[in-house]
Amino acid sequence: MRVNGRSISKGTGEGEALVSKDAISFFGGIDPKTGIVIDKGHCLEGKCIKGRVLVFPRGKGSTVGSYVLLQLKKNGCAPVAIINEEAEPIIVVGAIISSIPMVDKLEGGAYAKIKDGARVKVDGTSGTAEMEG
Amino acid sequence: MRQSMEILAALGKIYGAADMVPVTSVQVAGVSYKTIGDAGLEYLQDMVQKGAKVKVPTFLNPAGMDREQWEALRVPPAFAKKQLEILDTFAEMGIGMTCTCTPYLVGIRPKQSEHIAWSESSAISFANSVLGARTNREGGPSALAAAICGFTPNYGLHLDENRVANLLVKVETELKGTSDFGAMGAYIGEAAKGKTPAFVGVKAASEDRLKSLGASMAAWGSVAIYNMQGITPEWNVVDGAEEITFGARELAETREKIGGDGKPDMVAIGCPHASLSEIEEVAVKVRGKKLATKLWVCTARKTKEAADKAGFTQAIEQAGGNVVADTCMVVCPLEEMGIKHAACNSGKAAKYLTNMFKRKVVYGDVGDIICE
């Protein structure tokens, strides 16, 4: 199934979806050296975002979070792509400076249907996402 | 350049901007190592490696320390090393080392209706409200991108329709000093809940007091623009605006709420950065005396140079205080310097220092909080 969304950060990335129902604060919420979620009580606590298509509603917290995405990228621990329900500046800026493909506002309620672990391909240039099923 | 353009285009897209608007100056936040850490430093070094240069006059928000006096002021050397590396990256991009939240006090004073891209919340409030210039609340990277491209997405406070006030504040008490303006800012900041306040009933307010009011509203409630009848250049209030009253009771309750007690380790003046006349006020108060408590008067380097010439710095230093440039009590590593409790005359500093120390500051005007 291929759905249209909004292009935010260019490039393509493919991998297994890691779906978070909670918003994510990259600053203080994710270890930039390992990509492991360290935010206490977060629904992804203990999970690793490295190499995954990270699916979460939106960013939150400190604007330094943009820089943490870049650290993750340089450490080889960044997600391969990002899908947000609705983008906000911290994640938008972080994805662009780290060259992580990103889309948001998928049509037809597709965001809510992405299953954890499903194979997803994000094309940030055209603003589309392709998923199993 | 290409990446900066991508950032601006993406932000324009998410905020629904129709086009870009040229800016005449940019203020970049995210300067203190305490705020941006290694993650920010690495990003800035990356930008320098890619050859990033600014296109319009661009200057910095306060850093984590005074560039010249950091050793004397006991800033940890490891922190200082990182801070200097950060400042080097900005200099490399062609950015001025103003390191202040009051650019409008050191010659960077946009005119009414001029489009700018500023980052520090109190400077944004002052520029939009007191000067009538137009800026959104920029983040560090979006301001840098605007500086590199020379324009910013045209949305939010760049547009007339978003500058209209919709919360009428009837001030029904006399505001005596800077700390009263700061307290009113704290109260209205919290009460505004996203609305734009317009004040009636304030007979006179110096720029120093307006800067304190705006800083406090921005810190307590992210207010980026306000109107004040007969004082600010813009007075646009929507018909049927919600009305609230700020009277003697509200003032007393707010002062009670933000101020604590006990003996502070430090008296911190200059949030936002002190003007020359505010430094003079402190100098007059302490001249010929010996202070019992550490005193910092934070200001822009250019303002400090004027204070040096006028003899104000000397009077403060002889009393045992410091006139500190480039930084302030909010962005420097006070905890690492052994400070656990502070006094201040600023509603904004009260908010941040209370969070930092997990203890309410002693709150009052210069005359009340400086202890001999």
Image: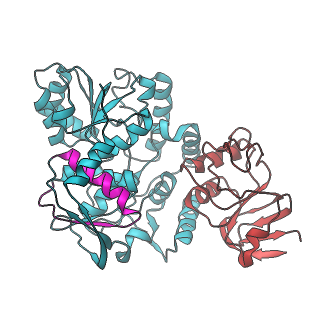
Compared to residue B338, the image places residue A11 above or below, namely below
Which of the 4 quarters of the picture holds residue A34?
top right
Residue A125 makes an appearance in the image:
yes
Q: In the displayed image of the protein, which residue is found farthest to the right?
A: A133
**Residue B156, image x and y in percent?**
42, 70
Taking depth in this image into account, of B284 and B144 the one nearest to the observer is B284
Taking depth in this image into account, of B323 and B183 the one nearest to the observer is B183
Instruction: Specify the segment rendered in magenta.
Output: B177-205
**Count of marks placed on residues:** 0
Q: Which chain is red?
A: A
Is B206 inside the magenta-drawn segment? no
Is B194 inside the magenta-drawn segment? yes
Q: In the displayed image of the protein, which residue is found farthest to the bottom?
A: B239
Q: Residue at x 41, y 64 (%)?
A: B194
Q: Which colour style is shown?
A: by chain
Q: Chain B drawn in what color? A: cyan
**Residue B127, image x and y in percent?**
29, 59
